[in-house]
Image (spheres, helix red, strand yellow):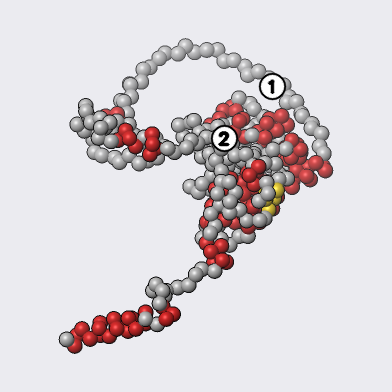
Amino acid sequence: MSKFLPKLMTATALAATFSIPAFAEGFGLGRPALPEEITAWNLDISPNGDGLPVGSGSVEDGEMIFSENCAVCHGEFAEGVDNWPKLAGGDGTLADKDPLKTVGSYWPYLSTVYDYVRRSMPFGNAQTMSDDDVYAITAYILYSNYIVEDDFVLSNENFLDVDMPNADGFIIDDRPSSEYTIFTEENACYENCKDSVEITKRATVLDVTPDEAGTDQAAAEPAPEAAPVEVAVAEEAPVEAPVEAPAEVVTAAFDADLAAKGETVFKKCKACHQTGEGAKNKTGPILNGVFMAKVAHVDGFKYSNDMLGANEAGAVWDEAHLAEFLAKPKSVYSKTKMTFAGLKKDSEIAAVIEYLKSVSQ
């Protein structure tokens, strides 16, 4: 009996403890949570605005805060870095085979943006930003998706006034009433089923289809090349090369004050492009000498095929072409590696072009 004595004593001690008046109700564990403790955990924000804290933040402040806390993963312009998510772009792609789902193109509620940033960001240092900082970051993400202007200030008061582009792109999930019944035994169809399932096509976007010996091997093997056929070519008399007329020198008017403003706006481009002495190709090519130069003219930079085609066609970065490209790069060269959505103001575009003239002289 002695080996059971410790357990017996423990049980007796617990019984005596729970008989004390302070533990008369329940087990006497813990205490009611304080209001401030509940508030610290109750962070959810509903689409109707419930749970939004009082505060505000501007696009201007958000650009700086985003650059310091978010850009390392999501890019300076919310364009995404490597495999980290893109937060901007994708407008009009939801019907494509490979849609780009971002805050601007896909998310129906702005509350989801604020809630997620406030709860989980920045990565590895969550819940360290103030409510005003989160408002500012959310405002900058809206601006990056062309939903608000650069002077916009987001707050708990105007939060629900923001119209998300895909707000009407979802339907009510009523599957328990409209779909589940088709899987009941009375309605289910188990006739004419296949004896086996085979892979007939392979994934194109993600490399997820496993390779198996012999699978589609015949289709993968290239067809044998045909033997070359010799063709006799008659010799032609040499043709003298035409004398090229001297190239017309284009002299563009230059506004130094406007160029100075453009240098300030160009800070949005410095993450990818360098100018001046010692400039090097980065994510984008150096832009020294770009004004009135041929498209895709920088040696050592790997341009997209459509820009290389423009080079062969003789396209030039004149004022009109630069303005069109800076406003919306993807609309000019859809395959361009430039992920920046574009400058929204004509005044900013004109200033940047003037700055590019200054580094092209």
Q: Which residue is mark 2?
A: 91
Q: Is residue 262 visible?
A: yes
User: Quick check: 316 above or below 146?
Assistant: above
* x and y percentages locating residue 182 in the rendered image: 32, 33
For the residues carrying marks 1 and 2, which lies nearer the camera in this image?
2
Residue contact at pointers 1 and 2, CB within 8 angstroms: no
What type is the residue that disc 1 sits on?
Answer: Glu
Viewer-nearest residue: 113 or 79: 113
The mark that comes first in sequence, 1 or 2, is: 2
Label 2 CA crowd tier, 10 Å (few <14, some 14–19, many 20+) = some
Rendered residue at 54%/69% (across/down): 34
Residue 79 seen from this side: no
Q: Position of residue 289 (x, y in %)?
A: 70, 39
Q: Position of residue 236 (x, y in %)?
A: 52, 12
* Drawn side of residue 346 relative to residue 285, left or right: right
The correct choice, above or below, for 256 with respect to 18 in the image is: above
Question: Residue at (57%, 15%) from the top-left corner?
Answer: 238
* Residue 244: assigned label: 1
Front residue of 184 and 213? 184
Extreme bottom residue here? 2
Q: In percent of the image, x 32 and y 39: which residue is there?
A: 209
